[in-house]
Amino acid sequence: LRDVYGEPLGPEDVARLARRTHGWAACLQLFHLATRGKAVAERRAVLETLHHRSRLVREFLTRNVLDELPDPLRDFLVRTSVLQRPTGPLCDALLGQQGSMTVLAELERRQLFTVRLDGQVVYRYHQVLRSYCLAELVEREGEARVAGLFRRAGQLMEGAGDAEGAFEAYVAAGDRSDALRLLDQQGDALVPSARGLLEVLPGPWVEADPWLGLARARQLVAGGQLDAAAAVYAGTGESAPPAAAALLDRERRAVSLWLSADSPRPADLGDWPGLLRGAVQRDPLDAAEQLSAVAGPAARLAEALALALAGHLPAARLALAGAAGAPDGSVWVGAVSHLLSAVDRLLSSSPSAAPMILVVDGLDAPAIVRLAQAAAASLSDPDGDRADALVHQLAGVARREGDLWGKALLATLGAVGLWRRGHPSAPARLRAAGAAFAELGAAVPEAWLLGLAALAPGADRDDLTAALAAARGAGVPALVGMLETRLSALLGAPPCPPAAPAASRPDPEGIRVTVRCFGSFELTQDGYEVDLTGLRPRTRALLHLLAAHGGRAVHRDQLCEALWPHADAGSALRNVQVAVSSLRQAVPVALGRDVPVVRREGERYALDLGEEAVFDVAAFESALARARGEMARGQQSAALEALDEALARQREPLLAADGSVGWVVERRDRLVEDAVWAAIELSRRLLDQGMAAAAAEACQHGLRLDPYRDELWRRLVSAADRAGDQAEAARYRRRYHQVLCELGVADASVALPV
């Protein structure tokens, strides 16, 4: 905002804008376009209208930007939005006019989400802008008229040699004959585009066309659903033309290698999928040597994996760098390379220094995205509690989707995270992950997991002997050497006492049912977590939403808007009723007792788990209300106690594992604001009483929730100064200065004075 647009905002406003737009560059640019040239107060007023739901934010900002355009420019944008990549001649032909190239250049000059592609005369509208313009076009012209415009756009783009744009236009027009004709002519080139449109294509289209079948099979592979993909490959290949049949058969054979636990070693196939499959079965170093002779970025990635399985990490890093830096590498090769680099850092001594994994966010590969989310959580959560909860959740998703390899890899990430922290349950979790790989015929990762479990504190001779046998059987000399060294040391020393079993988690307040929403969602009864893995996603979302309101009733319109924002009112209400019914059936079964679960109050619904149930959100809000009341009455001691209790309740953001769902972000931000207010008030009052150390702790609590709160940083520095801890004060000043540099309101080259 300062360096590019020349219109900076204050740190707190920038932090609020980043939270409310999820830091998405498109929304940030829309905000700038909607507020440029306006006073700070006016810009702040626009900022306050952004209510966290990403769809509403996009629509609001886009509408504000377009409303300020002259009518001819706005009309041009709306009418040409049927073109995937507009050019001057295409727009002229579509609109029956001249001068479109000048208009496109003007849109680019105004920075209106219109960009020229690689210095050509071809442009592209940003998808945010294009989606909004298409919606306005339908509202203005009607669906039938817009279908005709798409058909005309498809003909024009096909004539200009843009098969991808033409195919998308024919699909949007519902023109099956022309869409399938294009697929017959250029199917191999159009499969990636077709895969992106599968969700909107009618079922009969997909079933009838081999190229669409290939796109569907690749989509299933990207989701880790190999069984389903193999069935589609086989069924589609029977009637495919030669060009499609060859692709279908080759990819079907590659997928089938990963399906059978007792597959023969596929090294004789000579390509990278077969050699990599061999690397997870036995002798990964041998597979890596063969892969080194295969050309291409994907082969370098497979070589890096094989070398890592062999325990040769320095060589694996070199191969990985070759895959990531290859100029002809595909998007997915680059994404997986970045993911593996992050996992490598996770296993290093200082994983918190690794960057978050953002490169796979837009990748249409759910199986890879799940792994990236788990790795990113582990990198950003050194304590591991939130990361472990998210990994468990993602493994459940992988299991339900039929992604067995993904489930095993996620289980491995979770188990290795516990092992690094020395958690007593780590060996059991490592062995369980190893068993998952054993079922998949992957003896090499199984051996490594058994080896890590045997190298954990408390392992005995039998553990080491079993792991050593697995390592020898899998042909991993590096692991064999590690285990033999540990076994020799063990035989020359007194036996280690067995590790004490992990104690069951007691309920600290002795409450029968507790509902935790801060951090990851958890429902416990008598201190034991209730198994809710059988809930459908929307039913689970309803449970989370009601729980996040602390047992208070929520209006059904709010439920419809939060959970089914794109459905019409009738459909959304029916969905709410179905989800409520599912909750009423499933939760009592999980609890093993009869409880109302969901209580209806007119047009409102509330989560009702009995009088003894405790909601952490409700307890937080109750403590906060009590603190405000005590402050109003001038009861200093009671106010401090209530503020401290409120902060103790919210140590993590709301439903952190639920990600950036619109209603979650809105509720989460509000609760974080409340907790930060409590931290500010508590630290101020503690400082006034001379309790500098306690005030610093309150500031740190608030900064963990909102690291950009300027007032807390200043008070933290002041608390250290008052405590006489000059070294700590200097450290806080440096961290505060780093935050200011990150926000662009301080010069990174100038050190903050100590």
Image (cartoon, rainbow, N blue to C red):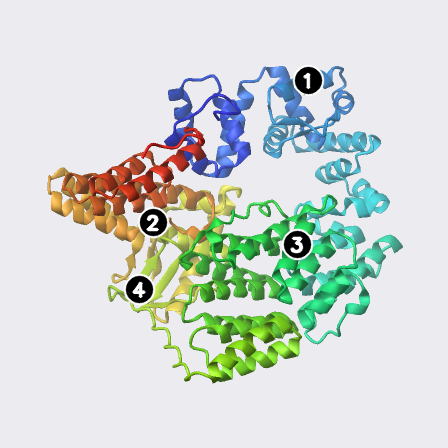
**Residue 80 location in percent, x, y?**
69, 26
| Sequence-first disc among 2 and 3 | 3
| Sequence-first disc among 4 and 2 | 4
In three-dimensional space, the C-alpha distance between marks 1 and 2, rounded to whole angstroms, equals 50 Å
Q: Are marks 1 and 4 in contact (CB under 8 Å)?
A: no
* Location of residue 217 with respect to 27 vertically, above or below: below
| Sequence-first disc among 1 and 4 | 1
In three-dimensional space, the C-alpha distance between marks 2 and 3, rounded to whole angstroms, equals 50 Å
Q: Is 146 displayed left or right of 669 in the figure?
A: right
Would you say residue 626 is visible in this rendering?
yes
Numbered disc 2: secondary structure: loop
Residue type of the residue flagged with mark 3: Leu
- Of the two numbered discs 1 and 4 in the rendering, the one whose residue sits closer to the viewer: 1
- Of the two numbered discs 2 and 3 in the rendering, the one whose residue sits closer to the viewer: 3
In three-dimensional space, the C-alpha distance between marks 3 and 4, rounded to whole angstroms, equals 52 Å
Residue type of the residue flagged with mark 2: His
User: Residue 411 or 349: which is nearer the viewer?
Assistant: 349
Residue type of the residue flagged with mark 4: Val
Q: Is 319 displayed left or right of 419 in the figure?
A: right
Count of picture labels: 4
Residue picked out by circle 2? 549
In three-dimensional space, the C-alpha distance between marks 1 and 4, rounded to whole angstroms, equals 64 Å
**Residue 135 location in percent, x, y?**
60, 32
Numbered disc 4: secondary structure: strand
User: Residue 172 or 721: which is nearer the viewer?
Assistant: 721
Residue picked out by circle 1? 103
Residue 513: mark in rendering:
4
**Residue 262 location in percent, x, y?**
70, 76
| Sequence-first disc among 3 and 4 | 3
- Of the two numbered discs 1 and 2 in the rendering, the one whose residue sits closer to the viewer: 1
Residue found 64% across the figure and 73% down from its top: 477
Residue picked out by circle 3? 318
